[in-house]
Image (cartoon, rainbow, N blue to C red):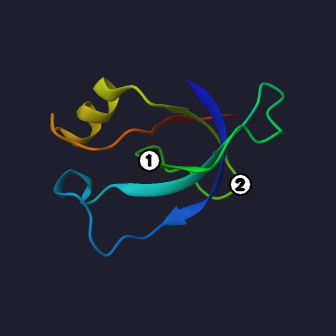
Amino acid sequence: MVHAKVMGSATATIKHRTLVGCKLLLVQPLMADRRSPDGDPVLAADTTGAGRGDLVAITSDGRFAREITGDETTPLRWTVMGIED
């Protein structure tokens, strides 16, 4: 699990079949202080309703990604687990 800040959303004209209907967010992983960037931004699928400026918890757990898409062959890596209060 990694803390991240939502920078915005991504729009794709063509998606892998397992990502059709998934909301994609551009998120910036954060260091432990939850302020400093930790690497480059990543794309994450969101089912929680997060929006720009929200602090979220993301994961690269493949099993969770497969559960969200319902497909064992998804190329999805990052997913939003929850929105922080």
Residue 27 image point, x, y percent: 60, 49
Q: Quadrant of the C terminus?
A: top right
**Is residue 81 depicted above or below 6 in this figure?**
above
Give the residue pinned by disc 1: 46
Q: 31 above or below 78?
A: above
Is residue 1 toward the left or the right of residue 29 in the image? Answer: left
Q: Residue 77, image x and y in percent?
A: 38, 38
Query: Mark 1 belongs to which amino acid?
Result: Asp
Is residue 29 left or right of 32 when viewed as pictured? Answer: left
- Asked if the residue at tag 1 contacts the one at tag 2, i.e. Cβ–Cβ closer than 8 Å, the answer is no
Mark 2 is surrounded, within 10 Å at the Cα level, by few (under 14), some (14 to 19) or many (20 or more) other residues, namely: few
Q: Residues within 10 Å of mark 1 (few under 14, many from 20)?
A: many
Q: Is residue 23 left or right of residue 17?
A: right
Query: Could you say whether the residue bearing mark 2 is in a helix, strand or loop?
Result: loop
Which residue extends farthest front?
Answer: 39
Q: Amino acid at mark 2?
A: Gly
Q: Earlier in the sequence, mark 2 or mark 1?
A: 1
Location of mark 2 (residue) = 53
- Tell me where residue 61 sits by quadrant: top left
